[in-house]
Image: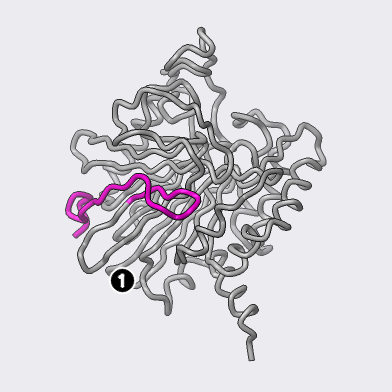
Amino acid sequence: MFTRRTLSKLLATLSLAPAAALSQGRPPLSRIAFGSCANQSMAQPIWEAILAYRPDLFIFAGDNVYGDFNTPDGDNLKRAYEAARTIPGYARLRETVSHLAVWDDHDYGLNDGGLEFPHKARSKELFLDFWNAPAGDVRRQREGIYDARIIGPQGMRVQVILLDVRWFRSPLRITDQRGAPGKERYLPDPDPGKTMLGAEQWAWLADELRKPAEVRLVVSSTQVLAEGHGWERWGNFPLEKQKLIDTIRASGAKGVVLLSGDRHIGALYRETPADLYPLYEATSSGLNMVYWAAKEAGPNRLGAIYAAANFGVVEIDWWERKLVLALRDDAGTPRRAIEIAFDTLGIA
């Protein structure tokens, strides 16, 4: 007979099973939490609030540890993962809650890094080992760590698409006015040869979006919709941002919601592209890495930023046909929220 602890571990590792296994015999997801930017060298009290929220699924949206490195052995990243294993709340969530993960720059190994990082194969190996990916996991056989799952019964399916915006991403265009509002580090680059995802991942994404699901959570560690700042974002490659919108539209996929991290702030965004339902984005960052003094323009932001420790939630009411995107603080109190009707997202 299973002990309670063993059963909890089995439930948590369901996140690593194939999509079909995740969808069988499980009630529909109704409480999904996510977050990013957890420095293993600092206190992480927010896990208590996340565990108290009792999510059905937790999504680690990048910078799950801070382990930048510049040597082939990746020892600094390895030590970062070893330290994260000893953090009680972090460990308890990994043991008891189904979870999925994608990386951002600091668990990739290079600040703002992209395809140019010479040690990315090592960071990928360490990432997959830490997240207990089995030997046969497709991510061990192909470049990058992009991944997807479909969870829930027919009519109540949630597709989670985890984009890798590091492995293939072209070099960024450096600002000509460092620190200036809206031009802090990078400038938009209209070069059609630049890519966020790479050809293979773009083709994969188009195929994933054609699979049947009702709600689709597309997770990009860097912000997709945000405008008005010069840090990392999809807007640094405007043609690639447009390609993402075009890919969603061409696939016929309904119910797409965007989740992101990276920025050390929390915020909600909305954009309505031509011939497509409104796209909403929730940025949750950081779990303990916060830019308290953040100020920035937000032409498509819904309300103010939330510049304190936070985690994001997606609450789905299948019977009322609506979902809520929200940011909660380190006590679990909602700080920003928006309710979205299924009809608004084109969900039949």
Residue 226 rendering spot, x and y as whole percentages = 37, 31
Q: Is residue 242 visible?
A: yes
Color theme of the render: one colour
Residue at (49%, 73%) from the top-left corner? 21
Q: Nearer the viewer, residue 309 or 256?
A: 309
Which quadrant holds the C terminus?
bottom left
Residue 142 rendering spot, x and y as whole percentages = 61, 49
116 in relation to 276, above or below:
above
Residue at (59%, 52%) from the top-left corner? 45
Would residue 65 appear left or right of 49 to someone viewing this image?
right
343 in relation to 222, above or below:
below
Residue furthest top in the image: 176
Amino acid carrying mark 1 in the image: Gln
Total labels drawn: 1
Residue 50 rendering spot, x and y as whole percentages = 50, 58
Dot 1 alpha-carbon crowd within 10 angstroms: few under 14, some 14 to 19, many 20 or more: few
Q: Is residue 327 magenta?
A: yes
Q: Quadrant of residue 152?
A: bottom left
**Which residues are the magenta region?**
325-348
Residue 18 rendering spot, x and y as whole percentages = 52, 67
175 in relation to 196, above or below:
above
Which quadrant holds the N terminus?
bottom right
Q: Nearer the viewer, residue 173 or 186?
A: 186
Q: Which residue is mark 1?
A: 154
Would residue 220 appear left or right of 93 to someone viewing this image?
left
Q: Is residue 199 visible?
A: no
88 in relation to 219, above or below:
below
Q: Quadrant of residue 306?
A: top left
